[in-house]
Image (cartoon, rainbow, N blue to C red):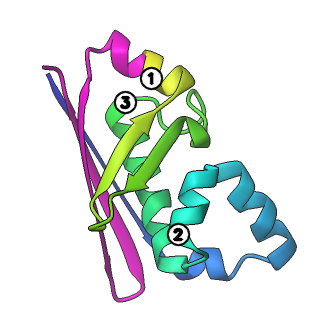
Amino acid sequence: MIKCGIDLLRTSRLSEINPAIRARFIRRVYTETEIAQARGDNDTLSGIFAAKEAVSKALGTGIGKVAWQEIEILHATNGEPSVLLHGEALEVAQAKGLNEWSVSITHEGGMAAAVAVAQSA
């Protein structure tokens, strides 16, 4: 089985959020590791957000049944993103036999896009 998801958003959406609300939003959506890896970079945070949405779509749940922080997008030293699932997101993936993930993130013209593909081995 192969499942995929895609998401696209304007990177300015995060920068336009009221600073007090933005800090709370970032703590709710991103894991500590994601926050540390992004180092406050709006493009990186937007790409991670798009990737989380894409993964939730590949899971067939969207955000709601699974929480934002249950989908973690990590970056290797070369910048390559990867998916790490926790909690309900991991349980849904296991129930569907989705145990191999690939995610790609891109930025262009003030937009961030991500595609996630999952397959069962």
Q: Amino acid at mark 1?
A: Leu
> SS class of the residue under badge 3?
helix
Which corner quadrant holds the C terminus? Answer: top left
Q: Residue at x 73, y 76 (%)?
A: 17
Query: Residue at label 2?
Result: 38
> Badge 3: few (under 14), some or many (20 or more) residues near its Cα, within 10 Å?
many
Range of residues picked out in magenta: 92-121
The label number, if any, that marks residue 90 in the structure image: 1
Q: Residue at x 36, y 43 (%)?
A: 83
**CB-based contact (under 8 Å), mark 3 and mark 2:** no
Is 119 contained in the magenta span? Answer: yes
Query: x and y percent of residue 57 in the render?
Result: 38, 39
The quarter holding residue 87 reads top right
> SS class of the residue under badge 2?
helix
> SS class of the residue under badge 1?
helix
Q: Amino acid at mark 2?
A: Ala
Q: Residue at x 43, y 59 (%)?
A: 50
Disc 3 from disc 2: Cα separation: 24 Å
Residue that extends furthest to the top in the rendered view of this protein: 95
Q: Earlier in the sequence, mark 3 or mark 2?
A: 2
Disc 1 from disc 3: Cα separation: 10 Å
Q: Nearer the viewer, mark 2 or mark 1?
A: 2
Disc 2 from disc 1: Cα separation: 23 Å
Determine if residue 35 is in view: yes
Query: Residue at label 3?
Result: 59
